[in-house]
Image (spheres, rainbow, N blue to C red):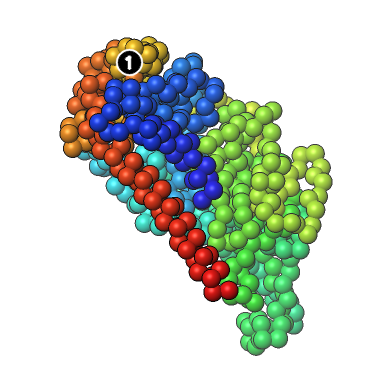
Amino acid sequence: MKQLVKTMAPRLQLEKAAWRWVESVKPEDIGQEHIELAYRISLPACKRGNCRRNCKGNPNCLVGIGEQTWLGEIDENAFHNIDDPNSERRDKNTFVGLTNLGATCYVNTFLQVWFHNLELRRSLYQCYNSRAQEHNTESDYEPQSICEHLQYLFALLQNSNRKYIDPSGLVKALGLDTGQQQDAQEFSKLFLSLLEDTLSKQKNPTLQNVIQQQFCGQFSYVTVCNECGRSSALPSRFYELELNIQGHKNLTECVTEFLKDEKLDGDNRYFCESCQSKQNATRRIRLHSLPPTLNLQLMRFVFDRQTGHKKKLNTYISFPEQLDMAPFFEVTKDQKCVYELSAVLIHRGISAYSGHYIAHVKDARTSDWYKFNDEEIERMEGKKLQLGTEEEIAETVKSQTRKPKCSKGYHCSRNAYMLVYKIQEEESLDPSKTIVQVPEFLQRLVDQDNHKFEEWCSEMSDMRKQSVDKGKAKHEEVKELYELLPARDGEPYEFIPLDWLKKWLDDSTATKKIDNLDFLCFHGKLHPDRVGDAKRVSQQAGQVLYERYGGGPRLDGSTLCQECVEQRCRVLRLKNQLNEDHKEVSNLVKRTVRNLCFKIS
């Protein structure tokens, strides 16, 4: 309220000053000088730097109405709200990001990891597509199945001109809820299973077992009866090793526990075929073979029996850049068992039901490490994986355990939930093996999308240029016209609405016609009560504004209304007289009361 009073006080003071002459001038004696006083024609104009804000009660104050934006040097970006379309363009020798559709960051991380598996990408491109063959010479083919969408998505990630692409086609085909974050590890299993089923139906025999050849390993559940010593083995296969991390400090401890002996006793005793009865036994997992791509799931999301919900374990785990699996199983002559780290999937956040997923992936061609964070991609310096900053960002609560020191060749994370290792090549990778050719039918789709993107860039650039050109023209117009606005003493002038002038200065592209209808009195002239909401400008400036923007009616010096001034004069004089009469009557009553009291006493 105090601020409102401070703001209105100068305007009220100007209002009183404009009509102070009515005390000594009768309505029939009003002259031109009194009319000009009422309309504040002769108030001194404010100079730039003297006013903190515009003096609304002074029609000659042209400071602080938006002119400061135009009178100095102006950045071209101020003339439009259209971003440079080239900022959406993929930089040379960089990868393509994926749009987060709401809660699909976990999908994006896996897609980037799978895309960088060159063998998987190459095999996926080779999948026979009958629908594509039917549209071999046409341009109306659109992906429909999950496999088709994945093919197209990988082709875009490889050859798109865009900085990032929209994976909504694949996400929709998978039937995923974009507003709800799913279990990332469960999604990985289901998707690989689905992809394996799709590839197994291919006519090309080399593609039928691609998923197994790349990701599938063999192990057995070996059970030994403590009574008779009989051993039985249940063969099984795996696509990832699920490693418990609770109570462990490094990856070796996690793998060791995964393979350790388990006692079967009590209610959990084993039925021995040889003994034909339940007996105490020992069970363990025995590894037989490992895949070229070894996925290690760090079980960060576990079921909490106390709460009945999943929780995230923020345990620090150390893992090597080079992993030797030889100590964990009997290695055959041709079995390769030395792996190199190729990807680390990170979950930011402390809850198992929320947070954000990103992926650190090693480029198979250059050995550079990249961080994939949906649309944003960052290349790590020095061809090294860097998780330090990531751990700091993810630190949302005070940890009870300090981050351990990592030896050279090791990394430590409390947020990694999946590690991907690739079998180490004995010799440097043949450059030809790193080249994955996009099939013609997919490249046509990519070319179509690139063409649409270039058209969009061209359209946005034209709109941006038009906006800039209009802004520059407006800039020159304002700089030139603002110098003409002040009305000099003795020269013709006009009144322009203050709100219109502000709009004219605020809008760099278009302004509506000048509308003065609300400023007219009953006599069709400028109402003296509205002069505080208008600005007096030179007639030359007014002429330019009306020629360019139109509108009206025009309010020049001839539209000062003498009848309204005379009427206001009568009202103010009557008010003053009533105030005087009220004071006189009040004093008379006070004197009478005092006299009566004196006589009574």
Q: Is residue 211 above or below residue 94?
A: below
Furthest-front residue in this view: 599
x and y, in percent, of residue 183 in the image: 52, 60
Q: Is residue 67 above or below residue 140?
A: above
Residue 280 placement, left or right of 362: right
x and y, in percent, of residue 57 in the image: 41, 33
The residue at the point 67 percent across, 61 percent down is 313
Nearest to the observer: residue 29 or residue 101: 29
Q: Is residue 541 among what the camera can see?
A: no
Q: Quadrant of the C terminus?
A: bottom right
- Report which quarter residue 336 is drawn in: top right
- The residue where tag 1 is placed is 538
- Report which quarter residue 61 is drawn in: top left
Nearest to the observer: residue 546 or residue 412: 546
- Report which quarter residue 133 is drawn in: top left
SS at badge 1? strand
The residue at the point 53 percent across, 71 percent down is 599
Residue 29 placement, left or right of 398: left
Residue 526 placement, left or right of 254: left
Label 1 sits on what residue type? Ser
The residue at the point 41 percent across, 34 percent down is 20
Furthest-left residue in this view: 523
Q: Is residue 127 above or below residue 276?
A: above
Nearest to the observer: residue 287 or residue 140: 140
Dot 1: few (<14), some (14–19), or many (≥20) neighbours within 10 Å?
many
Q: Is residue 176 above or below residue 25?
A: below
